[in-house]
Image (cartoon, rainbow, N blue to C red):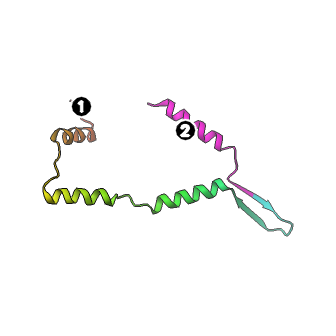
Amino acid sequence: MRIDAYNQIAHMYGAKSKSKTYTVARSNDGSDQVFISSLGRDITVAKKAVSEASDIREDKVDYIKSQIQTGEYKVDPSDFASKLLEKYKVTC
């Protein structure tokens, strides 16, 4: 368990949590207004960019496809076996 990484992340979020993400103000006319901070806008933009990004790296897929078609793609059996054992949590 990596406690040091957790402490760094907790410290980072602790420093950021003191700033407000939004502010609610009441104007004289009786209506409410909400102002979103620049940090809040940045987070929204980042979330949108991540959700629109493709999970598939087309350049790598095309490269491997071309290697398979030409017969150049080789898999090391020991690497394959170790990944398979790691996936199913089998120890030798």
Q: Residue furthest right?
A: 28
Q: Earlier in the sequence, mark 1 or mark 2?
A: 2
In screen coordinates, is 56 left or right of 81?
right
Image: 75 above or below 48: above
Point 52% across, 61% down: residue: 48
Q: Magenta stretch?
A: 1-23
Point 67% across, 53% down: residue: 21
Viewer-nearest residue: 79 or 73: 73
- The residue that label 2 is drawn on is 9
Pinpoint residue 91: horizontal percent, then vertical percent.
24, 31
Image: 67 above or below 17: below
- Identify which amino acid the numbered label 2 is placed on: Ile
Image: 53 above or below 3: below
Viewer-nearest residue: 11 or 76: 76
The quadrant the C terminus occupies is: top left
- The residue that label 1 is drawn on is 91
How far is the residue under mark 1 from the one under mark 2?
32 Å
State the mark number for residue 20: none
Pinpoint residue 53: horizontal percent, then vertical percent.
43, 60
Pinpoint residue 74: horizontal percent, then vertical percent.
16, 48
| Majority secondary structure of magenta residues | helix
Pinpoint residue 49: horizontal percent, then vertical percent.
50, 60
Point 24% across, 35% down: residue: 90
Point 75% across, 58% down: residue: 24
The quadrant the N terminus occupies is: top left
Where disc 2 sits, the SS reads helix
Where disc 1 sits, the SS reads loop
Q: Residue furthest bottom?
A: 29
- Identify which amino acid the numbered label 1 is placed on: Thr
Image: 89 above or below 68: above
